[in-house]
Amino acid sequence: MSETQIAQERKVVTSIPGPKSQAMHKRRLEAVSAGAGAALPAYIEAAHGAILVDVDGNQLIDLGSGIGVVTIGHTNAGVIAAVQEQVTKLTHTLFTATPYEPYVEVCELLNKHVPGNFKKKTALFNSGAEAVENAVKLVRKATRKNGIVVFDHAYHGRTNLTFSMNFKNAPYGNGFGPTAASIQHVPMSYPYRDPQGMTGAEAAQRSITYIEKRVGVEDLAAIFIEPIQGEGGFIVPAPGFLKTLSDWAHANGVLVVADEVQAGIARTGKWFATEWEEGFEPDLFTIAKGIAGGMPISAVTGRAEIMDASHPGGMGGTFGGNPVSAAAAVAVLKQIEAGGVIERAQQIEALLVPKLRELQAKYPVIGDVRGRGAMIAIEFVEPGTLNPNKAAVDAVAKFMHSNGVFVLTAGTHYNVIRFLPPLAITDELLLDALGVLEEALKSL
């Protein structure tokens, strides 16, 4: 099945997972490590735009985008063409051995579009976690200090260093220790759960007090923060929180790293989610997921003097900035430059948020609606309280999955459903998915 044959419509022809998926899942359980789980074991054969087609012929509306990866849409024509052309010319040499142009072009484009009124440089890697690891190396090298501050509800990856930076131990780190040293966790701005009326500046001062009293600044290299938290539940900090933090950090010789792995690359209705907070000035950015339409690549971009702090050979890796992945990233970045992509994220927010607020008014199990662009979440509670309602989320997700809408759950308390659709999704598909969501809510 080619991408042009996949109609952009939901279609349920068997149970989900269907018989072929169930048979394939038995093979998986025999062959694949139990450590690799499955949110929905419906095995996908093809995809295009915002539709997943499983091996049984079911067509699912994709509200997950491979966890934020295919922001540009599944089997995007520009990405396909770039990959096909590149794969016939060069698949690998290793950039730090014998380099090639696509790597350089990705770096040029990121240097151009990453926020910050300073000269920038970039290095390319494979995954978001690898970008974060290298950002840690760079800030430590540049400052000659070791300490790293991260925030409650944060998620930064699954490697030893990055799971040590996560807020939630299970399932990312439990039993995999020891954790990495010199990582300190401090409170995050969480408007829905903070004391009523707490401003962003007040929440930041709470964090700063914790840093100064509990951590200390003498050996603090950097603050790492997601401008909108991803796995933590799409938490958008209160206005002023990020700026107050970065002002304090820079006044105290501490660097600021924005982890834009999930929120960046047009996802929130701007090139980077950082841009929503005027005056917030990160020194480095970690970038991955949506940058290459499904091909594996990541980046660290930031102040040239920090990016140049490493000695030659200190940055790199066998597959980092692979030419095929780099060609795909160039295609995505140029499509965003051409216009329409960022605007589509804004349109998706304008459609989703009012509809979700209508559902919130009807179903008190929805405690909060939040997010930006095509990064929107609803938090479930026991009605009339702030108590997390994981059971309701599990039931709603199961209902939506079985009716052909793939959604992802999130949140420290597993009580959040997130809407992370490809920007290629149509309004009709979004409205169809919201109809299924309401049916799920009625069934609770």
Image (spheres, rainbow, N blue to C red):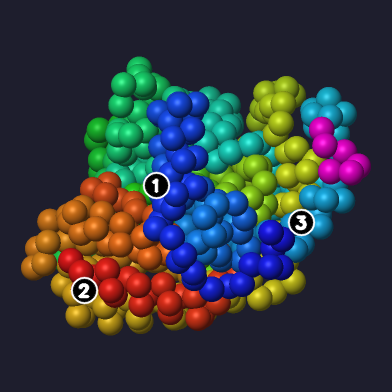
Please determine whether, in this image, residue 172 is positioned above or below residue 201.
Answer: above
What type is the residue that disc 1 sits on? Answer: Ala
Identify the residue at horizontal 69%, vertical 63% (top origin).
3
Quadrant in which the N terminus appears: bottom right
Evaluate whether residue 428 shows in this view.
Answer: yes
Using the numbered discs, state the Cα–Cα distance from disc 1 to disc 3 in whole angstroms. 27 Å
Give the residue pinned by disc 3.
Answer: 80
Q: What residue type is labelled 2?
A: Lys
Residue at the image position 24 percent from the left and 75 percent from the top? 360
Per the model, the C-alpha gap separating discs 2 and 1 is: 23 Å
9 or 289, nearer to the observer: 9
Q: Which percent across, then down, holds residue 338?
A: 74, 71
Residue visible at 16% across and 72% down?
364
Instruction: Check the picture and name the quadrant holding the C terminus.
Output: bottom left
Secondary structure predominantly adopted by residues drawn in magenta = loop
Q: What stretch is highlighted in magenta?
A: 87-92
Q: Name the residue under label 1.
A: 39
Q: Name the image quarter holding residue 175.
A: top left
| 434 relative to 42, above or below | below
Q: Can residue 61 be seen in this view?
A: no
- Image location (x, y in percent) of residue 226: 44, 50
Q: Identify the mark nearer the N-term, 3 or 2.
A: 3
Q: What element carries label 1?
A: loop
Q: What SS does tag 2 mark?
A: helix
Where is mark 2, residue-wise?
442
Is 188 placed above or below 74 here?
above
Name the front one of labels 1 and 3: 1
